[in-house]
Image (tube, rainbow, N blue to C red):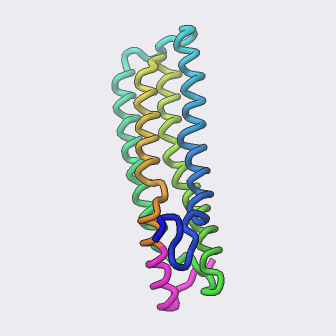
Amino acid sequence: MSPLFDDEFDLNRIIIKPLYFGMAVNVLIPMGLLVVCYYFDRQQTLSNRIPEMAETLFWVLGGVSVAQAGVALWLRNKVMHQPMIRRKETFEDYLIDFMSSKSKSIFLIIAGIVLYGILYFYLTAQFEPLLFFVIFSFFAFQVVRPRFGFLRKVIARQKELVEQGSFRRD
């Protein structure tokens, strides 16, 4: 069996929209912002506005970032196991729509980690901690991004829910 196709469903079709959105929000945009911040760092146009609080702020934002990544992982596991299907006949279409919409919110939560790094760079003019936030955000994206194995588990769970008569009601 090819990893791109299941017996019944085109896994690639289900996974492609959320994956591309996630790559844009969690890889391309942060890299662009990193280039802009690198330019400002090399031009030395910013100064450390909070020298006495810089280290404390780094640890606070780092802790919030770890918590935010944990929330994204928890949401992925919680949301993806609730009923997604409204009608059995259009199982794949509802699965694509639900996966796409819920993945977007999870990826935006992860993208917020980069914003903490940019805020820290703006306040302290320290480029290296910004790299930490960008790399951590990328790592968190890699952990929560949709994969074929996870998708197969979601499909199996949704089939169970449909067989039990548990459908999405919103």
Residue 96 placement (x, y as % from top left)? 61, 68
Residue at the image point whose x is 54% and y is 42% from the top: 26
Residue 19's image quarter? bottom right
Q: Is residue 72 above or below residue 4?
A: above
Q: Nearer the viewer, residue 113 or 155?
A: 155
Residue at the image point whose x is 49% and y is 21% from the top: 123
Q: Is residue 163 above or below residue 7?
A: below
Residue 24 placement (x, y as % from top left)? 60, 43
In the rendered image, residue 158 lying in the magenta stretch gets the answer yes
Residue at the image point whose x is 56% and y is 75% from the top: 9
Magenta portion: prevailing SS class: helix
| Left or right: 86, with 2 as reference point | right
Give the magenta range: 155-170
Residue at the image point whose x is 40% and y is 41% from the top: 64
The quadrant of the picture occupied by the C terminus is bottom right
Residue 43's image quarter? top right
Residue 160 placement (x, y as % from top left)? 45, 85
